[in-house]
Amino acid sequence: MVTIMDKDQIALPIDELPAKWYNIMPDLPEPLPPPKEPETGPSRMEFLGRTMVKECLGQEMSNQSWIPIPEEIRELYVHMGRPRPLYRAKRLEKRLNLKKVRLYYKREDLSPTGSHKTNTAIAQAYYAMKEGKTTLSTETGAGQWGTALAYAAKLLDLECVVFWVRSVYDWKTDRRVLMKLLGAKVYSSPSKETKTGRDILSKNPKSPGSLGIAISEGLEYAETHKDTVYCLGSVLNHVMMQQSVIGLETIKQFDMIDEKPDLIVGCLGGGSNFGGIALPIIGEVLKGKRKCEFLAAQSQAAPNLVKGEYKYDFGDVAEHTPLLKMYTLGHKTEMNPIKADGLRYHAAGPIISLLRKHNIVKAVAYPVDEKSIFEAARTFLQTEGWLPAPESSYALRAGIDEALKAEKAGSEKVICMNISGHGWLDLDAYREKLEIK
């Protein structure tokens, strides 16, 4: 038990690793609008039944509050370094001259591949293996999810095929090497491997790609290749649920130091890391067990929660998915590439969107030049010593902004930021954005 309030690192013992995932569905302020079939074309629900992991689809619709984590998955969680520490950012507080505000951050960058994505990658790969599949197909934006799934596939003796958004594939050469070292086949998306990709390239050979396009390619590849199943890195409920280990650990860690967060901050594209840390705490707020606020940090390149419309939309460009009720910019929307490209998705996950509708989740979007984002990351590196991913740096920027706002108002506040990944394979972005020679 931690007894010193100013301890830098709050480490949860291995025997405190969560044994169940938390499912917020039964606790939502209103029932989640169900997926819908479009008015024309084949059944998208049947398509997902053919292309996705059946156990994950079952979890998607579950109304159980707690889903037991198989022992084999818990063993793999421990193998990859869970539980992960919570840190008090005392040096950052000092740099910002904070007297009344206390800053904490959760270290999800400590996984073997450098991000929170391994939490759901391990689970999806495990269930796919149990169902007799031999190959996993997927999309990736920043590259963190593709790397995590390649890692999980290799641990479970599966093959992995990754469709990577071209604008990122072209500059993140070292992360591409890491995926290939893990045995994955990696294609620049849009690619010539799928009809979706070929059609887009025929109209725009220089297409920078998008997560919506890459998702379409991953789904099509699973549909057209034997014993292949598609795995999704964000947006859907089963992904958020499998990421809930982040928030469940965080609750226990704050309890260890007799502290309670007043604000949880995370970056958000589709919602996996934000949902992972926030949803277990939101569940306690909805049950009246605590008070806390929640802030999603986004890019103005894809401000789905800030400027999107809450309506039914497809999750991918080729319209393979059912219609989902989300805050969306439109699945055909073209969005300019950014360095934090994991945030460049047209829609927020249905659960996050419903919570945004009820004003439980708030959002802020930062300029596409990302100057303030990378400056926040540099400040964090120089004070706390860790290099965050560009996506995680959005959470840092928002957390710092909220801390300074509270300090100026003379308000005592505890802020927790989720560091979803490290930036060691993003140094080219740091070199460009901070003009380092």
Image (tube, helix red, strand yellow):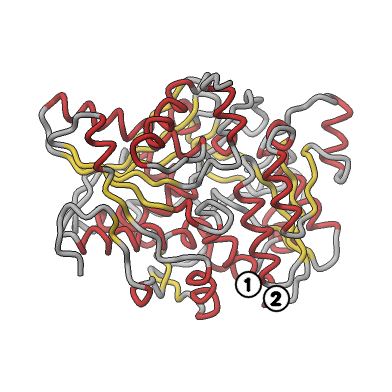
Quarter residue 425 falls in? top right
Label 1: few (<14), some or many (≥20) within 10 Å? some
Q: On the rendered structure, is 199 left or right of 413?
A: right
The amino acid beneath tag 2 is: Glu
Quarter residue 284 falls in? bottom left
Mark 2 touching mark 1, by CB under 8 A?
yes
Q: Residue 18: where, in percent of width, then height?
A: 38, 71
Q: Residue 150: where, in percent of width, then height?
A: 69, 58
- Image quarter in which the N terminus is found: bottom left
Between the C-alphas of marks 2 and 1, the distance is 6 Å
The secondary structure type at the circle numbered 2 is loop
* Residue pictured at 75% horizontal, 46% vertical: 163
Residue that numbered label 2 is attached to = 131
* Residue pictured at 45% horizontal, 53% vertical: 108
Q: Nearer the viewer, residue 384 or 138?
A: 384
The secondary structure type at the circle numbered 1 is helix
Is 353 located above or below residue 225 in the figure?
above
Residue that numbered label 1 is attached to = 127
Label 2: few (<14), some or many (≥20) within 10 Å? some
Q: Residue 219: where, in percent of width, then height?
A: 74, 52
* Residue pictured at 85% horizontal, 65% vertical: 226
The amino acid beneath tag 1 is: Tyr
Q: Residue furthest front?
A: 437
Q: Nearer the viewer, residue 415 or 78?
A: 78
Q: On the rendered structure, is 290 left or right of 391?
A: left
- Image quarter in which the C terminus is found: top right
Quarter residue 66 falls in? bottom left
Q: Residue furthest left?
A: 410
* Residue pictured at 43% horizontal, 30% vertical: 378
Q: Which mark is residue 227?
A: none
